[in-house]
């Protein structure tokens, strides 16, 4: 079992969390933990996208180049 932790949230937000948790048969703690996991994953995804966009700009790849770049990459993989 996880060690107890405390996070303070405004009362109106807590009421919304309790309602959302009840709607999916979870405790507010379970619901909040899942919401935090989703947010952390989304943050990681956005950071990865930003990093890849910077790298693409650095080598001069534009969004319109993507279908060609992807096709070339797939062709090279098949040739290996």
Image (spheres, rainbow, N blue to C red):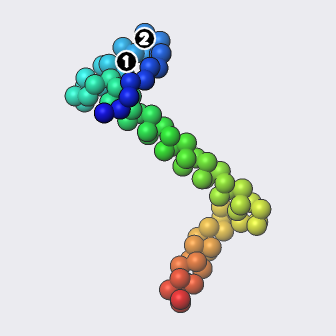
Does residue 20 show up?
Answer: no
Across and down, in percent, residue 73 comes to: 58, 77
Left/right placement of residue 22 relative to residue 37 reads: left
| Residues packed near mark 1 inside 10 Å, few (<14), some (14 to 19) or many (20 plus) | few
Residue at (65% x, 64% y) in the render:
64
Image marks 2 and 1: residues in contact by CB distance under 8 Å? yes
Q: Is residue 11 above or below residue 38?
A: above
Residue pointed to by mark 2: 12
- Circle on res. 16: 1
Residue sticking out furthest to the left: 25
Q: Secondary structure at mark 1?
A: helix
Q: Is residue 6 above or below residue 66?
A: above
**Front-most of residues 68 and 48:** 48
Query: Residue 77, position in %: x, y?
Result: 53, 82
- Asked if residue 61 can be seen in this view, the reply is yes
- Which quarter shows the N terminus? top left
Q: Is 74 on the left or on the right of 5, as rendered?
A: right
**Residue at left 38%, top 28%?**
3
Residue 26 image offset from top left, x and y in percent: 26, 28
């Amino acid at each position: 079992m996880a060690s107890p932790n405390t996070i303070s949230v405004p009362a109106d937000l807590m009421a919304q969390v309790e309602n959302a948790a009840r709607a999916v048969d979870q405790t507010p703690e379970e619901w909040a933990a899942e919401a935090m996991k989703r947010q952390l994953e989304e943050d990681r995804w956005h950071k990865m996208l930003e990093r890849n966009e910077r790298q693409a700009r650095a080598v001069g790849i534009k969004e319109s180049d993507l279908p060609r770049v992807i096709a070339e990459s797939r062709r090279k993989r098949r040739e290996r």
